Image (cartoon, rainbow, N blue to C red):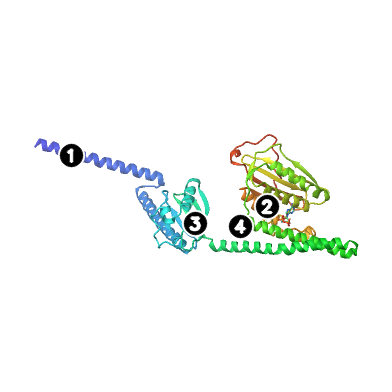
Amino acid sequence: MDAVALLFIVLLAILLGWALSVALSRGRTIERLQEATGATDADDVEKRVRTALEDAEDARWNAEQANHDAGYLTELLTAGVVRLRDDLTVEFANGAAHVMLERRPGSMVGRSALEAFVDVRIEAIARVAMESGSANGEVTVRSSAGATVTVRARRSPVSGVWLVLEDVSELRRLQRIRTEFIDNLSHELRTPLTTISLLAETAARDAESASPRLRDRISKIEVETGHLTQMVNELLDLSRIESGTAQLLLDDVDLVRVARSTAERLRMFAERQGLRIELDLPDRVSPVRGDEDRLGQVLVNLIHNAVKFSPDGGEIVVGVRQEANEIRVWVRDPGIGVPRADLARIFERFYKVDRARVRGRGGTGLGLSIARHVVESHGGRIWAESEEGSGSTFALTVPLAPQDSVAGQPEGAQPEPDERVRGGA
Ligand code: ADP
């Protein structure tokens, strides 16, 4: 009997202890919640916890709806949208992506990128984006139509990678047609132009004793034929560069040498207009990997423009400087400048700032666009800084040949071109 009573007492004590600890811990929890929420008492805590739970439920519902909405929106897009997980398996792909790649609806989800796209290049673009944050590319996908697709990949801030695929087949087809048209047209125009030019030259010789009026007219024919020939040649150049048929003949190029020799070639032309050409060149820079003739042609265009658009009697500066991973070349003139609104557009083909302000100095409007193509095909950049009425600086950069790309800045580094209004190409 005593043993039973003892056992009963022990059990009672354990029970009481447990109840006490639960009460204490509940009390502590309530205290903590009161502290955290600023509630006044236990009832208030309960009310606030309930509200918080309701808010969390609302947030979950909203997130679900937003997710739903985003899915619905992507189905409206004509661009393909694909989300890859960290292991590059497809987590989501909209209808357009399936259509573009000619896959059964929904069949891409769950597959690896390689299986889904059947294209190592798209997988490679996704992999680069996963590592570096973003990557772009253009591929011809394996489908019956062989569509040309641009792929833009961005790493998601949460996880995985987003890919946006755009079918640009029609755009590329039209660009090809335009290039072929310009190419054919320029070829057709070249032959009669050469004949007219020769005839004008002969007529000018034959008309030595003719009236000044006739001689003047013949000379105008010669000048205009010259302009037309230049335009046709530049058009041909541009279409070849744009279509990629103009191959770059790559070599190690010393841009100081190119700048010096180009400036010398144009010195006479500048002096005829009362302009001096000053050189601002270091003794030596590391070579760039490029096509010397094409890069020379860019500098001819820039210096030629500097002369064309400057008043008589000023100074044009041609400069070169080595930077960490690239060579910078610039041409500064004291000329009429480029209005702010036109700065970004002067690199477009045929774009010319208000034709009236340079009457008699007409060009084709193609020089800068060729220059931009050449510089970009070397992996560089070209831009203009200018203020209307007080000159311009046209600058370009070309990356150093790979083995020199970590070279430091040599002694005697040249100053920055004027930091003024900047227009990008
Ligand atoms: P073009 O010189 O044959 O007209 P470009 O493509 O070389 O064609 O230049 C496009 C336009 O940019 C020029 O018509 C001119 O309006 C403007 N431009 C180019 N270089 C200069 C310069 N150094 N100063 C002022 N304007 C310039």
Asked whether, in this view, residue 148 is left or right of residue 291, the answer is left
Query: How far, Cα to Cα, is label 4 from label 2?
Result: 15 Å
- Discs 3, 4 touching: Cβ within 8 Å: no
* Residue at the disc numbered 2: 371
* Residue at the disc numbered 3: 164
Ligand 1 within 8 Å of disc 1? The answer is no
Q: Nearer the viewer, mark 4 or mark 2?
A: 4
The one nearer the camera, 122 or 110, is: 122
Can residue 421 be seen at all in this image of the molecule? no
Q: Which mark is residue 11?
A: 1
- Discs 1, 4 touching: Cβ within 8 Å: no
Q: Amino acid at mark 1?
A: Leu
Task: State the SS at label 1.
Answer: helix
- Discs 1, 2 touching: Cβ within 8 Å: no
- Image coords of residue 116 (percent x, y): 42, 56
Q: Indicate which disc, 4 or 2, sits on the residue closer to the N terminus.
A: 4
Q: Amino acid at mark 4?
A: Ser
Q: Quadrant of ligand 1?
A: bottom right
Task: State the SS at label 4.
Answer: helix
Task: Classify residue 227 by image quadrant.
Answer: bottom right
Task: State the SS at label 3.
Answer: strand
Please give the count of numbered marks on the rendered protein: 4
Assess disc 3: are there few (<14), some (14-19) or many (≥20) residues with their C-alpha within 10 Å of its C-alpha. Answer: some
The one nearer the camera, 184 or 299, is: 184
Q: Amino acid at mark 3?
A: Val
Residue lying farthest top?
Answer: 411
Query: How far, Cα to Cα, is label 2 from label 3?
Result: 31 Å
* Residue at the disc numbered 4: 243
- Image coords of residue 52 (percent x, y): 39, 52
Q: Indicate which disc, 1 or 3, sits on the residue closer to the N terminus.
A: 1
Q: Indicate which disc, 1 or 2, sits on the residue closer to the N terminus.
A: 1
